[in-house]
Amino acid sequence: MVSLDIDDSKPLVPRGFNLDTILRYISRTVNSPLVSYLIVNALSRRVDVGRQLEVKDKVAATAALWTATNFILPTICRMTVRLLCSSSTVSWSNEVVVVTGGSHGVGFELTKRLLRASARVAVIDVNPFPELEVQYARLCRYYKCDITDLEAVKATADRIRSDLGNPTMLVNNAGIVSGKLLLDMTDSEVNKVIDVNLTAHFHLLRQFLPAMIAANRGHIVSIGSIVSFAGTPQASTYCASKGGVKLLHESMRREVASRYNAKNIQFSIAYPGVINTGLFKGLDLGQFFLPNLRPDTIARAVFAALGSGKGQEIYLPKLGSILPLTYMLPMGVRSALINAIAGGDSAMSTFSGHIKY
């Protein structure tokens, strides 16, 4: 029996000596009352007030500064985002969520969280699905389907609508990697990676997006990759397909809002680093800047994005959020920087993973 008892108290990025851990502790330190007091004390020495501030004045100023930085300013930021960005209310019992690649890894961890929240879940995969469908038959359905086969996708979409109703959320999660040099790949290997990682997104969007547009309600999540911003030798098809996912996400987010006026449909995308699922076994990007992630890490972040009712960009680890900025650098400098941080040119040389689709 598969348990839905989930421990989400752990940090998203594993503990240890890595950049995310350091940034987490710096954040806690900077936002502490002690730092606020030191700032007030330093400023009081430089401001000509005719007298030194008394201790009670410093304490009051410290409390005001700490409250402003930890509560008032974040609240103002949240309210501004709420006013400027559309959002939708999420009631999990009313949601029908389609998850591709839900039999293992990130998709399976996300499915568990969705079922725990009482959402109805349609899992699409070619791999056998654990016994969750039997345990939670009222909420969960498994559909064996090759998402690269358009006719199979159409038939599966019809079954999902008949069994669960029109999906309100779609998580395009399924993905594969070859790990070969481009010139060593067969035509079928090239096509399979592109079809699973990118073309299938088009198939699924065309099946489920029309009902969302008609209702002006829904949420589309794409699982991209950190390599959307940094091509890697020996992973050309994977990088190209994930770069395509990034641009498809951006295009559809704007297209749905501007051409169909369905501004309440949310679009989110995740850009994870290496996830410990076996897909990239042997790949080493360096554990300080880009520590390996657990599948539940991405699942937690995606579940939170779905529950927020707002479109989001999810970067894990934190370093991923600065990779788009590297495109401002000259190509040679950018390549050298990526190699220094992640061992880009040699990272795939020890690759031994591969999940057959």
Image: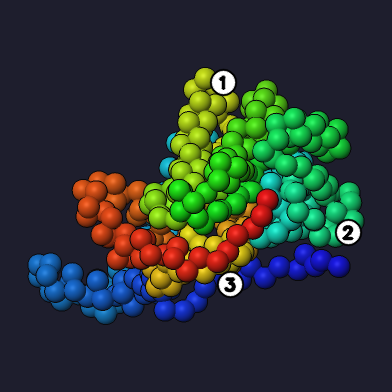
Q: Which residue sits at x=70%, y=31%?
A: 150
Q: Is residue 109 left or right of residue 221?
A: right
**Tags 3 and 2 in contact by the CB under 8 Å rule?**
no
**How far across and how far down the image is residue 49, in percent?**
12, 67
Residue tagged 3: 10
Q: Is residue 275 visible?
A: no
Task: Using the numbered discs, state the Cα–Cα distance from disc 1 to disc 2 in whole angstroms.
Answer: 39 Å
Dots 1, 2 in contact, CB < 8 A:
no
The dot on residue 73 is: none
Q: Left or right: 180 with respect to 58? A: right
The residue identified by callout 2 is 135
Tell which circle, 1 or 3, labels the residue nearer the N-terminal end: 3
65 to the left or right of 175 = left
Question: On the rendered image, what quadrant is the N terminus found in?
Answer: bottom right
- Give the amino acid at mark 3: Lys
Q: Residue at image x 9%, y 67%?
A: 48
Q: Nearer the viewer, mark 3 or mark 2?
A: 2
Residue at numbered disc 1: 260
In front here: 24 or 148? 148
Q: Secondary structure at mark 2?
A: helix
The kind of secondary structure element at disc 3 is: loop
Nearest the eye: 138 or 142 = 142
- How packed is label 2: few (under 14 Cα within 10 Å), some, or many (20 or more)? few
Residue at x-position 41% and y-position 70%: 286
| Three-letter amino acid code at the position of disc 1 | Tyr
The local crowd at label 1, few if under 14, some if 14 to 19, many if 20 or more residues have their Cα within 10 Å, is few
Q: Which one is earlier in the sequence, the residue at label 1 or at label 2?
A: 2
**Which one is earlier in the sequence, the residue at label 3 or at label 2?**
3
> Is 245 drawn above or below residue 293 in the view shown?
above
